[in-house]
Image: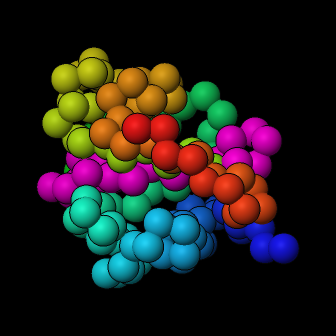
Amino acid sequence: MSKHVIKAGNGNQVSNRDNACVLLQDILGAEVLDRDTVSLPELGERHISCYTDKNRALIRNTDGEKDSGIFGFSINTLMIRLLSDGRLAIYDIDPEKLEVSIKDDEKAIEWSVFERISDHKWVITADLTKMKQLS
């Protein structure tokens, strides 16, 4: 039985994103366009970003600028979140919807905001045997 290889902790960002691309290809039928971007059937191109913090996700770089991550691309971002029980939650986030949901100086926001504004949501079990689309 296979299991995803997304790992918590600093230093895993690049390998987590690479592994997320493979996972999206296998589970959601995504076409990997490059190491940061996939194309999903019926949804189109999406930037890929992986997160392992239990409470929040960074939405700006360390200087507080919006030139990377969700705001650094002109397309939706698939935010892959490692849950504490090993499942993966995937949120399809439109940067314009996020923009109106945050304060000007916020560098990180709670997951409940992403859950609320997500265009599509999926949850995948740690052993990759079940996927549920929530919206």
Queried whether the magenta region covers residue 86, the answer comes back as yes
Is residue 33 at all visible to an observer of this figure? yes
86 in relation to 22, above or below: above
Which sits in the foreground, 23 or 129? Answer: 129
Asked whether, in this view, residue 68 is left or right of residue 132, the answer is left
Is residue 62 at all visible to an observer of this figure? no
Range of the magenta residues?
68-87
Queried whether the magenta region covers residue 133, the answer comes back as no
Asked whether, in this view, residue 131 is left or right of residue 119, the answer is right
The colour mode here is rainbow
Position of the C terminus, as image quadrant, is top left
Place of residue 98 in the rendered image (x, y in percent of width and height, measured from the top left): 26, 32
Asked where in the image residue 38 lies, by quadrant, the reply is bottom left
Which sits in the foreground, 51 or 125? Answer: 125
* Residue that lies at the very extreme toward the right in this rendered image: 1
Place of residue 132 in the rendered image (x, y in percent of width and height, measured from the top left): 57, 47
113 in relation to 126, above or below: above
Asked whether, in this view, residue 51 is left or right of residue 49, the answer is right
Q: Give the residue at x 20% y 56%.
A: 75
Q: Give the residue at x 37% y 43%.
A: 120
Place of residue 65 in the rendered image (x, y in percent of width and height, measured from the top left): 26, 41
Query: Number of numbered discs present?
Result: 0
Asked where in the image residue 6 lies, by quadrant, the reply is bottom right
Place of residue 121 in the rendered image (x, y in percent of width and height, measured from the top left): 45, 42
Q: Give the residue at x 84% y 73%.
A: 1
Asked whether, in this view, residue 56 is left or right of residue 125, the answer is left
Q: Give the residue at x 29% y 22%.
A: 102
Which sits in the foreground, 68 or 26? Answer: 26
